[in-house]
Amino acid sequence: MGKFPGIGTTIFSVMSKMAEDHGAINLSQGFPDFDGPAELMARLSWHVNNGHNQYAPLAGVPALQEQIAKKVSRLYHCEVDPARQVVVTPGATEALYCAITACVHPGDEVIVFDPSYDTYAPCVRLNGGVTRHIPTQYPDFAIDWQRVAGEISDRTRLIILNSPNNPSGKVWSEDDIHQLRRVIEGRDIQLISDEVYEHITFDGRAHLGLLRFPDLAARAYCISSFGKTYSVTGWRVGYCVAPEELISEMLKIHQFINFSTNAPMQYALADYLRDYPDKLLELSNFYNTKRNIFCKLLDKTRFNFVPSEGTYFQLADYSGLSDEPDREFAARLTREHKVAAIPVSVFYQEPPGQRIVRFCFAKNDDTLHEAARRLAAIR
Ligand code: PMP
Ligand code: GLN
């Protein structure tokens, strides 16, 4: 018997493969169908052609660590030591695995909010921990903080947050931060804040990164991804900012998984952040426009939806179209209507039985128009 029965292949691989097999427009796995900035691509080829092709240092290329520290100082007024409080990782995925492994001992409990990104629970389990899932539901995805307080015990070691949330798009409010502070007060609980969509919030909403709050940042691993920010998911570069004690624990794991992260990509990203520090501030507007276009197109279909608050995902309720469970519906949508989406039940320990799929709108407008034309034709 395998060591981890019950851990299957991630839904993102499953649906992207299905999209390819059936020649469907792939609005399932979250990645753009356009390239990142041309200047960034140019810096990568420059570094590849100018000898930056050997191992990067364990925690990252110093020039990139410095740019990350500058960015968090500018955006969140948080001063960190670039050499000791920043680790560059092969994607946010590796940062999540290392951070979870660094804090979870066998038997420890970890609170996650469902719908939760599909990496969290398996990583906790691989470390012998136990996840306690707090459900939130379509359409508002509000957190029941009383329930959270009731779940916390002396065994609770970690809470994993993700705002803006994948898949719901929910963005945390000041009140959520306040409630979080209240429930962990006086307890030895660490935080992992998955902020890979930190630069994608809509309708003027602010991203409340934990680095803004010194008392919370003092116990948090804050994780982000250049793949999301600069449309280069295949480059596999993310990072984690945390107090020195937490980073040094995390490095003990990182050194034996990847040792270090792709060198030329790090040099290119460091140059780009230095030369275009404000570029990432344009991302919210860019995706807000795409969300508006996609929602307007969805209005002509029989899907129901509430516009997403952040991320590049839009949920849609298909109960007006079908009674099928969401995995079956998503498979049929891909096979018969040639549009792939993600069934949202996979993000729940106990799916609430809603009829919801997730569409990724990080696509060229032509792609969105053609996908919506196909969705509108479903009767
Ligand atoms: N966290 C969330 C919420 C995500 O949606 C993703 C995927 N994009 C990741 C982490 C992993 O990011 P990366 O591609 O940088 O590993
Ligand atoms: N985070 C992306 C999504 O939600 C997928 C990343 C992956 O496939 N590992 O679709």
Image (spheres, helix red, strand yellow):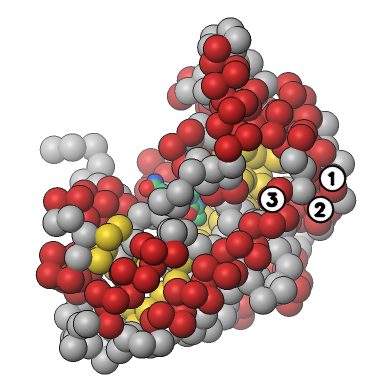
Mark 2 vs mark 3: give the one in front: 3
Q: Find numbered disc 1 in the image and state the secondary structure of the residue it sits on.
A: helix
Residue ID for mark 3 = 280
Measure the C-alpha gap from mark 2 to mark 3: 14 Å
Disc on the earlier residue, 1 or 3: 1
Measure the C-alpha gap from mark 1 to mark 2: 6 Å
Disc on the earlier residue, 2 or 3: 2
Residue type, mark 2 in image: Tyr
Whole-percent x, y for residue 159 in the image: 58, 57
Discs 1, 2 touching: Cβ within 8 Å:
yes
Which quadrant is the C terminus positioned in?
Answer: bottom left
* Mark 2, other Cα within 10 Å: few <14 / some 14–19 / many ≥20: some
Residue ID for mark 1 = 73
* Mark 1, other Cα within 10 Å: few <14 / some 14–19 / many ≥20: some
Residue type, mark 1 in image: Ser
The answer to whether residue 346 is visible is: no
The answer to which of 107 and 283 lies nearer the viewer is 283
Quadrant in the picture for residue 343: bottom left
The answer to which of 204 and 216 lies nearer the viewer is 204
Whole-percent x, y for residue 302 in the image: 30, 89
Residue ID for mark 2 = 76
